[in-house]
């Protein structure tokens, strides 16, 4: 997973507020993708992906330019306030399969709700029907 692509489903998608701030000029490619086994819940201005069997989320598969991968990974970890192993994380960065439009699968990093956040969302959060924040968030 040293230079795996990223699966983005919220404010990092093209046309959203963090896309230009974090991804413009740092990507080799951006293509539509779908991730199974997750659903989306509304957050305060951004969505949370929560692991859920049978769920499907729509987003983009983003491949970083080779020379900026480490810089981009660190920037996205900061954006998501993710620190490996920190129990206060709102998100966890995990590796999951993403299906491209042509049906092929690729392993990618994705930020999903940390366990405590996911439990709270499952009990009283608002599910984004259809798994596409562009169409429901």
Image (cartoon, helix red, strand yellow):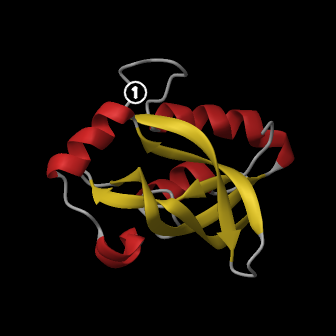
Q: In the image, is residue 103 above or below residue 90?
A: below
Query: Which residue is at the far right?
Result: 66
Can the viewer see residue 117 in this picture?
A: yes
Residue 20 image-quadrant placement? bottom right
Q: Residue 100 placed where, x, y %?
A: 70, 73
Badge 1 crowding class, 10 Å Cα cut-off, few under 14, some 14 to 19, many 20 or more, is some
Q: Residue 11 placed where, x, y %?
A: 43, 57
Looking at the picture, tell me which residue is in the foreground, 35 or 111.
Answer: 35
Residue shown at the point (19%, 60%) measured from the top left: 126
Query: The residue tagged with tag 1: helix, strand or loop?
Result: loop
Locate the C terminus and report the quarter of the image it occupies. Answer: bottom left
Looking at the picture, tell me which residue is in the foreground, 54 or 4.
Answer: 54
Q: Residue 61 placed where, x, y %?
A: 65, 63
Can the viewer see residue 137 in this picture?
A: no
Query: Which residue is at the far left?
Result: 124
Judge left or right: residue 3 versus residue 127: right
Looking at the picture, tell me which residue is in the foreground, 65 or 121.
Answer: 121
Query: Which residue is at the far front?
Result: 53
Query: Which residue is at the far top?
Result: 86
Residue 55 image-quadrant placement? bottom left
Q: In the image, is residue 89 above or below residue 125?
A: above
Locate the N terminus and report the quarter of the image it occupies. Answer: top right
Counting labels gives: 1
Residue shown at the point (32%, 42%) measured from the top left: 118
Residue shown at the point (45%, 37%) measured from the top left: 80
Q: Residue 17 placed where, x, y %?
A: 42, 59
Q: Which residue is mark 1?
A: 89
């Amino acid at each position: 997973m040293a230079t795996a692509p990223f699966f983005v489903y919220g404010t990092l998608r093209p046309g959203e507020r963090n896309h230009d701030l974090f991804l413009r000029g740092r990507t080799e490619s951006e293509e539509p993708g779908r991730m199974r086994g997750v659903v989306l819940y509304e957050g305060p201005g951004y969505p949370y992906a929560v692991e859920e069997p049978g769920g499907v989320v729509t987003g983009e598969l983003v491949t970083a330019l080779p020379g900026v991968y480490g810089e981009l990974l660190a920037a996205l970890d900061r954006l998501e306030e993710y620190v490996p192993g920190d129990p206060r994380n709102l998100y966890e960065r995990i590796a999951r399969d993403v299906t491209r439009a042509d049906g092929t699968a690729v392993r990618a990093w994705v930020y999903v709700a940390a366990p405590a956040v996911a439990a709270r969302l499952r009990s009283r959060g608002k599910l984004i029907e259809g798994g596409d924040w562009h169409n429901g968030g």
